[in-house]
Amino acid sequence: MNQPYPVPNNSARAVLLKGLAMGVFIALVLIVFQPFGTAEAEIKNKNLFLSGYGLIVAVGFWSSGLFFRYYLVDQQWTVGKQILFTSICFWLGITVAYFYVHLLGGTPSWNTYGIFVHNAGAISFFLIIAMTLTDYVIKLKRYSRGAATFNAEFREKGTISSGSAPKEPGLTAEKTTSGNEVASTSADFLSSPATEKVSIKDEQDRPVVSLPTSHIWCLRSDRNYVDVFYLDASGEPAKLTVRNTLTKVNDGLPSGFISCHRSYIVRAGGVESVTGNAQGYQLHHPAFPDCPVPVSRSKSKEVLRFLRS
């Protein structure tokens, strides 16, 4: 249950499709089998009324799913959390359905509400498990196979970058009092015309440091800050933290960088390999084993196409 899972905020379409599937399933079960005394109930336009349960559950699932999807963190999402999340969405839907049944009459109470939720849960439990695990397996196979194909293609062409940048004099990494690493450069290094450099600026558009483009791995958004992961003059991984937004920093980057995730920008030339799991693709640099770059599923095709070019 601790396997990574594609968090719902990656795909609104997935939330809609799952809600629709769950609503249709519930409507069909109620119409075909008419459990929990439904078969004996005398209801005008019974099939239409029973279909309303499915519609309500679907709408409740959509509403809660599309609302909560913005507050979920991709890297911390697992199969178990997905099952819990789906169950909560479903519970909100059946709560509305409980009041829907009282259109036929009767007074709501905690006792009848508990019975209603129990009966609805009996129908939905195995559906939730089956949908979650099936979705997980499908996405795991899709992205694992896609990553393997991509890596094989690049190895055959010999175009996968080693990700290593040549050692260049004059660039060192120092620790600030806050523990973040910052770059210090010599005048000779900065003025060298042979090395293309990127000027990293703060939120007031003041240059903080100029880094060789070939040394940069990725940029990561951290609220009001941007972490820049790069190789120092010794070829060792280092990190520079700048107070700015990823969008503003991105405006000053040259070609060769691509926004692959809402929180990441990566330099294509640093990608050594691609892996895939149920959450999508991840890009890897040999010098940054602890900093794989995730690729949003909505940007998968665009990013892979960019890396191939």
Image (cartoon, rainbow, N blue to C red):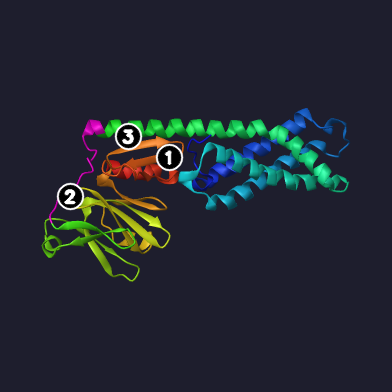
Question: Comparing marks 3 and 1, which lies closer to the viewer?
Answer: 1
Give whichever of discs 3 and 2 has the lower sequence position. Answer: 3
Lateral position of residue 21 relative to residue 299, left or right: right
Q: Secondary structure at mark 2?
A: loop
Give whichever of discs 3 and 1 has the lower sequence position. Answer: 3
Q: Which residue lies under the disc numbered 3?
A: 150
Count residues near mark 3 (Cα–Cα under 10 Å), then give few for <14, some for 14-19, many for 20+: some
Q: Write the residue at 59% across / 38% down.
A: 83
In which quadrant of the rendered view does residue 305 lie? top left
**Front-lying residue, 103 or 209:** 209
**Front-lying residue, 164 or 97:** 164
Q: Residue furthest top?
A: 33
Question: Comparing marks 2 and 1, which lies closer to the viewer?
Answer: 2
Q: Which residue lies under the disc numbered 2?
A: 234
Separation of marks 2 and 1 at Cα, in angstroms: 33 Å
The magenta stretch is 155-169
Separation of marks 3 and 2 at Cα, in angstroms: 31 Å
Q: Amino acid at mark 2?
A: Ser
Lateral position of residue 205 relative to residue 40, left or right: left
Q: Write the residue at 62% across / 35% down.
A: 128
Q: Amino acid at mark 1?
A: Gly
Question: Comparing marks 3 and 2, which lies closer to the viewer?
Answer: 2
Query: Is residue 49 among the parts visible in the rendering?
Result: no
Lateral position of residue 45 relative to residue 256, left or right: right
Residue 166 image point, x, y percent: 15, 47
